[in-house]
Amino acid sequence: MELFAVPDLPEIREGDDLAALIRGRVDLRPDDVVCVASTIVSKAEGRAFDLDDFPAGPRAREIAARLEEISGDEKDPRFAQAVLEESTEVIMEAPFLLTESRFGHVGVNAGIDRSNVPEHDLLLLPRRPSESAERIREGLPADRVLVTDTCGRPFRHGQRGVAVGWAGLAPARDWRGESDRDGRELGVTVENVADELAAAANLVAGEGDGGTPVVVVRDFEWGDHGESDAHFRDVDGDLIRQAVRGWEFDE
């Protein structure tokens, strides 16, 4: 398997045709997986906003005041309001905002970015990243597209690449019913291929001002395995979420 960045992409503006920009800079094959950073998808879809677009309500002001008290750093209640409007559930309010986005992704601050947003204050995640992936895929000779982001994980330091949207492939391959090396049947293994490819792509894409937002994965083979649509964990089976819901931060 080979991974390489798509070179020389310009600063993305609202309305830009990402598929055309990618297509004009790399010769793609049908079985390539094109990993596109959510940052440029959001920019193309007009998801950049200013803080003044989110007048703070009472709950946002209360959240910002508590976070400011905990951290000692000034917190803008308009940012808290943006997080609330982008979320279907606030799982944890302190010592940081952990929320579920409107498309099912759980992360800090609803995945809202405050960097790499020229002329604006905030960059929100795409509204429906899998639909975004499908639109990009329709304009490419490649059959598979991932929309990626970076986020932290419980029990680990640092961030890693994850998939927030996908088109042309299932997010996971299902090993259940197959055998291990000793002939025992696998009963629970569902491998999140979308996240693994996104993490690999993030190694190539890099971070900061030297980052490249599109990476091509070439010669990835699915293999003779089943497919699974599982990606975001169902709320009823998410024991960690249930535990966090009942937890309160002790200052």
Image (cartoon, rainbow, N blue to C red):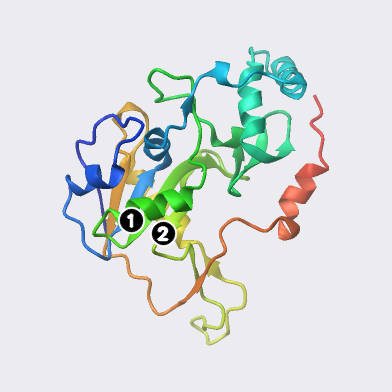
Q: Position of residue 108 (x, y in %)?
A: 60, 35
Mark identifier at residue 146: none
Q: Quadrant of residue 194?
A: bottom left
Residue density around tag 1, few if under 14, some if 14–19, many if 20 or more, within 10 Å: many
Distance of mark 2 from mark 1, alpha carbons?
A: 7 Å
Q: What element carries label 2?
A: strand
In the image, taking residue 171 as reference, residue 205 lies left or right, namely left
- Residue at image position (67%, 29%) is 96
Q: Position of residue 140 (x, y in %)?
A: 26, 55
Please name the amino acid that badge 1 sits on: Arg
Label 2 environment density (alpha carbons within 10 Å; few <14, some 14–19, many ≥20)? many
- The circle drawn on residue 167 is 2
Q: Which residue is drawn at the image coordinates 58% and 84% (left, top)?
A: 185
- Left/right of residue 191 with respect to residue 67 in the rendered view: left
Q: Mark 1 points at which residue?
A: 137
Q: Is residue 33 above or below residue 69?
A: below
Residue at position x 72%, y 37% in the image: 90
Spot the residue most to the bottom: 183
Kind of residue at disc 2 = Ala
Using residue 160 as the reference point, say whether residue 59 is left or right of it. right
Q: Quadrant of the C terminus?
A: top right
Q: Is residue 163 visible?
A: no
